[in-house]
Amino acid sequence: MSFTFARTHTCIASPKRANSSGRNFGVVFSQPPSAASRGLISLSRPVFKTILGFRVRPSDLRRIALMSEIVELRNGERLVVLTVEPPLGKYADKVGCWRDVRDDLLGGAFVDQLFTPYFIGEIDGEVVGSLSYYVATDRRGVGVIEFVATDENHRNKGIASILMKSAIERFLEDEGQALYLCTTNPIAGHLYERHGFTYHVGDGMRYLAQGAEAFDRERWVHQGEATVRDAHWGDLPALSALYNHPEPGWLLKDPLTESFAETRYESHFVKLLRRLEEGRGGFVVQENPTRVLVGAAAFERGQTFYDQHVAEMSFRVIPAYASAACELLERAIRKAGDIGVRTLQVSIAACDEDMAALAGTAGFAQEARLKDRLRVDDGWMDVLTYSRTVNGDVPPYRPIDDYYGTRKTWQHARVGE
Ligand SMILES: CC(C)(COP(=O)(O)OP(=O)(O)OC[C@H]1O[C@@H](n2cnc3c(N)ncnc32)[C@H](O)[C@@H]1OP(=O)(O)O)[C@@H](O)C(=O)NCCC(=O)NCCS
């Protein structure tokens, strides 16, 4: 027996008819958080049972599982709203994602660390819009909205707005507190403002859940001793919060990722962590007992023959944990030593004396002052290079004949050397 379950059993709903949870229109609703973390398509068990009375083929089951709700758009078209979690299967090439991690993330490789539901709108079986948010799988209080897009032929029909509403509701179901995003598109900015986002840092915006108005006052204070560990993919949202907070207001926010002053920070972490996976450096974070990330330090060694023993380092620590910065930096220094880095260096804007002081606590000292390196408003600012020796004697990381232009062994033999 084959039938179109969605048409038979799914209510048609307009967004105005949403109940308080807003999800009770369709046949299949989002899973509770405990069940949602294994990269499955959202499917609630009770609803699943109600359909078991029917003889449904597995292929139909999958189709039903994808069904979330149907919403009537203002022009009368029906939008099917799906909530899909990695592995995204056939949706993987229809949604946005960072290129550097696309296959892994959408294929479900990060589900233990990152919970990344995608909210997808379909009309007549065609994907016409999608967006996603990212939270740590085991810490869902802080998230980042990403990849908001509606197909050009379907814009201004209310699709992104409907998907955003679904995403926020799902986030709140998991007791989410703060959702971050950024945009340079005024239409998107308007969409976000309509959904309660307000401008935060630079072109970044933030949504705070009802009851989370004291988020900043409560998050960025000292709450017990912090411990240092290696960063992982699940740190993406918390790092966005850490780097998109106005304090500390260092001008060179994160030189490794080219993040400056008020510039945003999210894909930066993705790109950097991916590069560092190849053994080019390290990334450590500092977490307090309430599991808030209060500090981060990353280093990346030079990739050329001449700078292979020098690594550039970036770090950020919230002011309340400045006294713990030394421990964070020391860990990064040890890790740099482990991969044969001889010298670590940090670039610091001359105005950021507090940053220089923190570097000083971990044995960094000013080695150079580069005149007028930073454009600041109408003027120029010096950049200071702070450095510290990690290891006295290190083996080469790159063999000399790795490089184009060096005489190879067989050539040495031919010229009789
Ligand atoms: C931004 C974008 C996602 C909006 O998608 P959409 O499905 O057209 O949005 P909606 O129809 O839900 O409209 C949302 C709001 O924007 C308004 N809007 C949409 N298109 C508009 C347009 N061309 N001009 C003016 N306002 C517009 C709508 O009126 C609505 O406002 P309202 O709630 O006050 O009525 C879409 O334009 C897009 O994909 N842009 C390119 C990708 C992009 O920039 N994404 C954002 C990345 S941060």
Image (cartoon, rainbow, N blue to C red):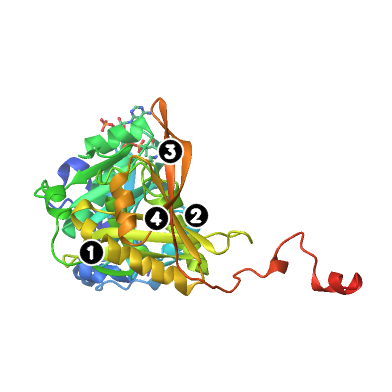
Numbered tag placed on residue 30 in the rendering: none
What percent of the width, then of the height, locates residue 92?
A: 46, 58
What percent of the width, then of the height, locates residue 35?
A: 24, 71
What percent of the width, then of the height, locates residue 164?
A: 28, 45
Q: Does the CB distance between marks 4 and 3 fall below 8 Å?
A: no
**Rounded to the nearest whole Å, what is the CA distance between mark 1 and mark 3?**
40 Å
Mark 3 secondary-structure assignment: strand
In the picture of the structure, the residue carrying the numbered disc 2 is 99
Of badges 1 and 4, nearer the viewer stands 4
**Rounded to the nearest whole Å, what is the CA distance between mark 1 and mark 4?**
37 Å
Of badges 2 and 3, nearer the viewer stands 3
**Amino acid type, mark 1:** Arg
Picture layout, residue 268 above or below residue 246: below
Q: Earlier in the sequence, mark 2 or mark 3?
A: 2
In the picture of the structure, the residue carrying the numbered disc 4 is 365
**Rounded to the nearest whole Å, what is the CA distance between mark 4 and mark 3?**
16 Å
Between 284 and 138, the one nearer to me in the picture? 284
Of badges 4 and 2, nearer the viewer stands 4
Q: How many marks?
A: 4
Q: Earlier in the sequence, mark 1 or mark 4?
A: 1
